[in-house]
Image: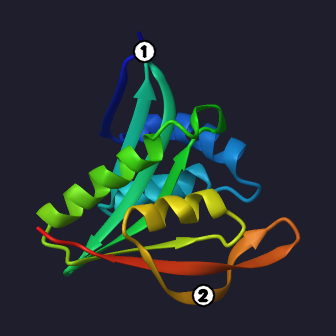
């Protein structure tokens, strides 16, 4: 039986986080971006199956709101509810920090992620034009938000 567990992201996790990031995205975050997020006090979480890192998330918490900056599950482990588990953790952390709203951006070219967010109570509130880098240019981002209830 496999053991799946979550914990806070540590700087030592960043090389493994970066490997998953590079496998999942054509234009990935650098390890330096993850390091900078932790140094800035953002909340980072890692998800392990047995002793292998299979997912991660980064959350920024501000006054009365939180912002999902990055959430990703390794391609081989997708479709098993792990992203939903990370999202639920970030929502719980946000509520404990007195956040009233939770925001995120998602690529229009990622319908699975968008469907996950919609199933979990997020609604589209706007579009950020040319937000994401792509190998061939730029892609818009759909901005989504969820009202949090303690």
Residue drawn 61% across and 40% down?
A: 20
Q: Badge 2 is on which residue?
A: 128
The quadrant in which residue 66 appears is bottom left
Q: What x and y, as percent, mark residue 145?
A: 39, 78
Q: How is the image coloured?
A: rainbow
The quadrant in which residue 16 appears is top right
Q: CA distance from mark 1 to mark 2?
A: 40 Å
Quarter containing the N terminus: top left
Q: What x and y, as percent, mark residue 13?
A: 45, 36
> Mark 1: few, some, or many residues within 10 Å (few <14, many ≥20)?
few
Residue drawn 45% across and 41% down?
A: 81
> Mark 2: few, some, or many residues within 10 Å (few <14, many ≥20)?
few
Q: Which mark is residue 20?
A: none
Residue drawn 19% across and 74% down?
A: 99
Q: Is residue 52 above or below residue 111?
A: above
In front: 56, or 102? Answer: 102
Badge 1 or badge 2: first in the primary sequence: 1
The extreme right residue here reads 136
Q: Badge 1 is on which residue?
A: 2
Quarter containing the C terminus: bottom left
């Amino acid at each position: 039986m496999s053991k799946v567990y979550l914990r806070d992201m540590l700087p030592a996790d960043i090389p493994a986080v970066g490997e998953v990031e590079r496998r999942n995205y054509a234009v990935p975050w650098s390890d330096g971006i993850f390091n900078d997020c932790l140094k800035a006090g953002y909340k980072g979480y890692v998800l392990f199956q047995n002793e292998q890192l299979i997912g991660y998330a980064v959350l920024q918490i501000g006054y009365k709101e939180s912002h999902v900056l990055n959430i990703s599950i390794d391609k081989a482990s997708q479709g098993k509810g792990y992203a939903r588990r990370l999202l639920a953790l970030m929502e719980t952390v946000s509520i404990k920090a007195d956040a009233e709203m939770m925001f995120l951006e998602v690529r229009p070219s990622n319908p699975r992620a968008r469907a996950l967010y919609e199933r979990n109570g997020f609604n589209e509130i706007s579009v950020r034009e040319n937000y994401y880098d792509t190998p061939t240019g730029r892609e818009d981002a759909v901005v989504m938000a969820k009202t949090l209830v303690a």
